[in-house]
Amino acid sequence: MIDLQDPALREQLRRRTPEGRYVISEAELVLAIRACKARGESERVQLLSEELVERCAPEFQRRTQGLRHRPELREEAIANMFEHLLREALDPQELFMTQNFPHYLRCLCADEFMRVLRQEGLHYRRDSEGRPLGQPQHIPRALVESLQASPSEEEGSPGADVADPQDAYERLHAVEESMRILTYLSDPLDRKIMVLRVFQSLKWDDIAQLCQRTERTVRLRYEKARAYLRACLDREQGQDATQVRQQPHQRRPAQHTPTTQGQNQQR
């Protein structure tokens, strides 16, 4: 428990256990920040916030190593992480960070890192286990542009007969298939969360505000909905495979091979 009246408060916050952990955890630190804010103790809030930022800074640095070749993007990502952290530390409705702070911090870093990549038109190649591989690559502009032709394009223009190398119609059908899969979700709120997160790439706090739920509730509903959709797709694929096996095999008509006697008669 934090003794806010202790004159040696900074030393108390930096005290560690023999295992290397802080005696006062980050979750307790967040709760103390909110309590001080409720009492209007701005100086205490600033002191505790500085300690929280100092603890999370090494994790922010480590999680943005993939942008070290772009220092300006890395600084932007870290600044966004700090802003997001402090904003949610002051929000009493945010319960996820007080219940599992290490996991919350990892999710925060991943969200901000991917947001910066999307904003700059970058993406990472990944290995067979899904881990980022090498440096981020630029996304071709053709993947971002709309499928509809601009009004200036005419039917007889030279570009009208050129095939799209990126196969834009295949992407359009992929979106339609995704919307069909979402119909498995009977709850409109679950469908809304999936659309906001997957298709619109919104952050968790924005989704929680739009859905009028806490961020932890939104995350849990998203994970449950995703697991349910995966099970539905597996069941759908299993049914398709069963139907294929049950279809009767079409037999080819037997070809008549003339015997030696028949060949002699023909002659």
Image (tube, rainbow, N blue to C red):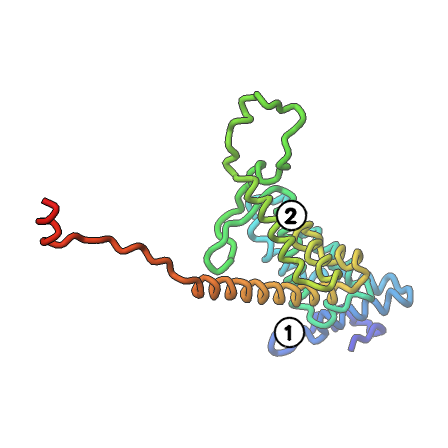
Residue that badge 1 annotates: 21
Q: Quadrant of the N terminus?
A: bottom right
Q: Quadrant of residue 210?
A: bottom right
Crowding near the residue tagged with mark 2, few <14, some 14–19, many ≥20 C-alpha atoms within 10 Å: some
**Mark 2 belongs to which amino acid?**
Val
Residue located farthest toward the front when viewing the structure as drawn: 265
Residue located farthest toward the right when viewing the structure as drawn: 40
Seen in the picture, residue 136 relative to 61 is either above or below; the reply is above
Q: Which of 18 and 52 lies nearest the eye of the viewer?
A: 52
Q: Position of residue 32 (x, y in %)?
A: 81, 70
Q: Position of residue 119 (x, y in %)?
A: 65, 44
Residue at 62% in and 57% down: 181
Residue at 71% in and 59% down: 191
**Mark 1 belongs to which amino acid?**
Arg
Say what secondary structure mark 2 lies in: helix
Say what secondary structure mark 1 lies in: loop
Crowding near the residue tagged with mark 1, few <14, some 14–19, many ≥20 C-alpha atoms within 10 Å: few
Residue that badge 2 annotates: 116
Residue at 56% in and 47% down: 123
- Give residue 81's mark: none
